Image: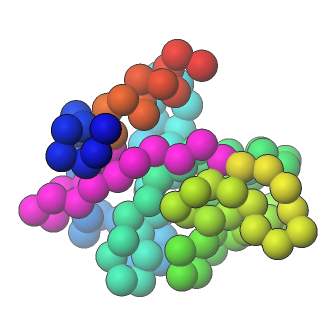
Amino acid sequence: MNAETRSWVEIGELADIPKEGARVVKTSAGCIAVFRTADDKVFAMDDRCPHKGGPLSQGIVHGTSVTCPLHNWVFDLATGLAKGADEGSVTVTATRVENGKVLLAADDLARRQAR
């Protein structure tokens, strides 16, 4: 499945997410942190660090990574994998920006609910 054949759910405006910041989307399967980088790339992942449950949406965005605000674990926004000496991962949700609107992949959201 590629970006052209996937179904997408609009969640809001890109302008509503601060550069190098995040917003949280609440779903029935939990909260998703939606991040915007300095160069307007958008990523989404679970808003919960696997280490101690820290809210990743309150972390520091640097490049295409986010640092957990509780214990400084760093995650790659594209893959959800912990970086450096830490091990673990966060589930990511595919994103897309179209005409200034942020979209999340509907199939990724459905998989979250099936867990």
Q: Position of residue 37 (x, y in %)?
A: 43, 76
Check if residue 99 falls in the magenta segment: yes
User: Count of labels shown?
Assistant: 0
The residues colored magenta run: 90-104
Q: Position of residue 45 (x, y in %)?
A: 54, 49
- In the rendered image, the quadrant that contains the N terminus is top left
Q: Return the residue found at the far left.
A: 99
84 left or right of 29? Answer: right
Q: Return the residue found at the far top.
A: 114
Which of the two residues, 92 or 17, is positioned nearer the viewer here? 92
Q: Position of residue 66 (x, y in %)?
A: 63, 69
Compared with 39, 73 (above or below) is above
36 left or right of 76? Answer: left
The residue shown at (33%, 76%) is 40
Provide the major secondary structure of the magenta segment. strand
In the rendered image, which quarter is residue 87 located in? bottom right
User: Which color scheme did the rendering employ for the protein?
Assistant: rainbow
The residue shown at (36%, 71%) is 41
The residue shown at (38%, 64%) is 42
Which of the two residues, 88 or 20, is positioned nearer the viewer here? 88
In the rendered image, which quarter is residue 53 located in? top right
- In the rendered image, the quadrant that contains the C terminus is top right
In the rendered image, which quarter is residue 8 located in? top left
92 left or right of 81? Answer: left
Q: Position of residue 34 (x, y in %)?
A: 44, 55
The residue shown at (55%, 31%) is 30
Residue 9 seen in the figure? no
